[in-house]
Image (cartoon, helix red, strand yellow):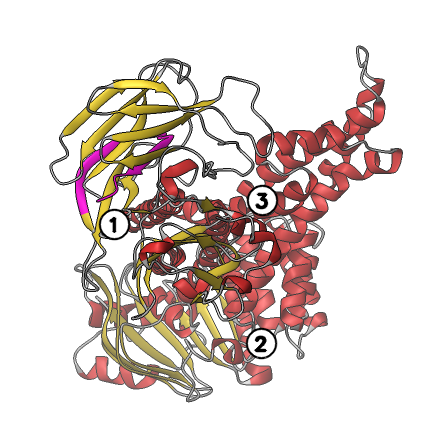
Amino acid sequence: MKILIRDVTLRYGRTTALDRLDLHVPAGSVYALLGRNGSGKSSLVKALLGHRRPDGGVLSIDGLDPWKARHRLMTRIAATPETPDAPPAMKVDAIGSFVASFHRSWDATGFRGRLDRFGIPTNRRFGALSRGQKGLVMLSLALAQRPDLLLLDDPTLGLDPVARRFVFDELIGELADRGTTVLLTTHDLEGIERIASHVGILSKGRLLVEGELEDLRSSAVTRGAEAPTLESLFFHFAGTEGN
Amino acid sequence: MRSFAYLFRREISQRTFLFVASLTMGLFVFGLPYLPGSHAAPAELRGAGGVVTALSWCAFLAILLGGSIFTRDLTENRLAFDFRLPVRPGAIWASRLLAAIVTLALAGALLVAPSAVAGMDLTGAAAGFEELLGHGEQGAVAFTPIAILALLLLANPIALASRTRSAWAAVDMFSVAIVCVAAYSSWQLLGLWEARSAQWRTTWLLATIALLGAAIASMRQVTLGRTEADHAQKSLSLTLFISSLTIASAVLAYANWYVRPQISALVGNYVYAASLGPDWVSLMGGTTRDKDFWARFLLHPSSGKTILLGPSEPLMDAGEAKGSRDGSRAAWLEWDGSRIHSSLRLYVLALTSQQATPTRTDITWKSPLPAWALSPRGDAVASLQHSGGENSPRRLVVENVDSAAIESSLLLPGCEHDGPLLFLNRTEVLAACGEIHGDLIPERWYGVLHVDLNSRVVRPFESGFYPNRLFAWRLNRSAPRPWDSAEQSSAFEGSPALDAVSRDRNHRWHWFDPQSKVLKPLLKEKQYQTGLRSLY
């Protein structure tokens, strides 16, 4: 699935979260959307999930408007929120069964397998899990849907190093198996560097730079950057001052 | 539909503890008669205890659920979980709302179930509702679910406003104010016209639209606001505002339409018709609006012109329009201002002109006014007024219609009960003093006084007057006064209404045809029904 964003503006009162944003996520790519806190990453994910209608511009996923066709798109899209939000009173396995009932392609074996690998007790209430465990449950739910598009809003936020590795390992496995398109916002530049094919850097709701990771590296080297890591690219393009 | 069912099932299954709590309380109510010190009959105790506990518990749950099913999950960022599922926003809203309603119903049922199995006597509870609502079991059956639903729906905007603390809450308060003002205004207007049925109908209309508006507002909160609290608040507040405007418009439009019936709305069997002169007729009676809603019209039969008279005290003489004996002027009373039980103002109409319009006079009387009469030429009015307490002697006051100056004011000794008034001529008045209850002969003092306005002499008047019909004069032809007047209110009993005032002066007799709803002149006396031959 491909994502096309043209001239999209999104405001919260007087604050402009996205300012005439243009962005393109090719089908089959792993797009890492980088930016400092408050740069508009989560707002973009909300708009892509159809949770918020943009104040202007055109936003489409495979030609469909996520605001209008959200319920249709969500059969092919899975997402993890920045803050895990499953019903706290439900047990983990009950949450799995509940979400499974909405998805015909539900991978029950994969769901249980991931929870086992992550060491998450399935008979515990979601609200009783740690922050990291909740995040991993949300990722397991998303991957078990066998989506065509994964929208991951800072999936490693609050995770310990082991859990962070789990996340990226699972993503690598998923990509190898199915070739899913991924749009991912993160501050974990080291982790995402292993899997990202495309990178976009947001600042104050505007896209500073966008392109394939290798092209950006070449461009940075040409412009005198010393080490073409994702972190150095981020600092090169976004700078170290306010966003 | 499948998605809706899954969401609904999840909502219900998450509330198992509420059902267990309800059943536990039900068992407690069941055990009430076994508590030490219980002396009432077990079934009655369970009935009253079960109803009170179930209502309190359901009201508490309604507020709790109303404040949480949409708003708590929204403001605590948990509604997004449902919005990542392939379901329509409407299904999310409907499943949550329906699950809350079913939860309330189940909780209430589980609470009363143990007592119901053992036997409940609801007589005491029904009596309580009778006291509270004026309707016993029927009122409870109709009122309780609506009240619980209202709590459920109204808790949502309150909870959202308190959680978002948005400026849109001011719009919500404004919306509530609009509804309150509309409700108060329509109640006042309908109350002024004594339209009791319409008042209750308006209340139901208001409650229904308000609940519908609150439900639609919560739907738009979910479907348009989705996971954004500020947008949800805006969508909710705007919808509530539009709903409140709709409610206010509907209620006010209904009330204003109700109190302005056409003359064709008069129901024939309940119409009292009286000629006011050669060309005008007064019609007063029940309408198709409601049996208890009476309207008063002046009709010019040859041109079809009608004048709807304003609201007035419906009882006694205050509700009647009167015509001067010379046919030149009609007079009637209307409430002065927009509040009932204040004062009554006299209005007059010149009957000599078809183009005449009602004129407001400066004469006002305190309500309740037992009796009043128009002078033969319409230039003065006489009224019987209270001189003190209820049993104090009545005072006869004669006022000039055009200047509102008091021409005479006389205390009528012994006249402690109200009766009709009649001008024999410009300077002589007959005042009946007594109390009439239907066809019964009153037990208290009863008689007719003759008042000479010039000499201010009051003396008993011998006549054949007796109260065979409410509000009816029937005078003995052998009496010394040569006037010829009789009024018959037989229309109250379903026959055509007639007025025989001064028929020798070419006044026409009319009757109101219930089928065609048209006032028709009676050409021959033969056309009267047998029961009306007693008219003079």
Residue occupying the far right of the picture: B118
- Is B269 contained in the magenta span? no
- Within-10-Å neighbours for mark 1: few <14, some 14–19, many 20+: some
Q: Secondary structure at mark 2?
A: helix
Q: Do the dots labelled 2 and 1 sit on one chain?
A: no
Q: Is residue B395 left or right of residue A144?
A: left
Residue at 79% across, 22% down = B32
Q: Amino acid at mark 2?
A: Gly
Q: Secondary structure at mark 3?
A: helix
Which mark is drawn over residue A173? 2
Q: Which residues are magenta?
A: B360-377
Please say whether residue A160 is visible from this viewpoint: no
Q: Do the dots labelled 1 and 3 sit on one chain?
A: yes
**Disc 1 is attached to a residue of which chain?**
B
- Is B367 contained in the magenta span? yes
Q: Is residue A10 above or below residue B416?
A: below
Mark 3, residue position: B148
Image spot of residue A73 (x, y percent): 50, 80
**Disc 2 is attached to a residue of which chain?**
A
Image spot of residue B417 (x, y percent): 43, 21
Q: Is residue B280 above or below residue B408?
A: below
Q: Is residue A152 above or below residue B347?
A: below
Q: Amino acid at mark 3?
A: Ile
Q: Nearer the viewer, residue B176 or A143?
A: B176
How far apart are the alpha carbons under marks 2 and 1?
108 Å
Q: Amino acid at mark 1?
A: Asp
Mark 1, residue position: B326
Discs 2/1, front: 1
Image spot of residue B72 (x, y percent): 48, 48
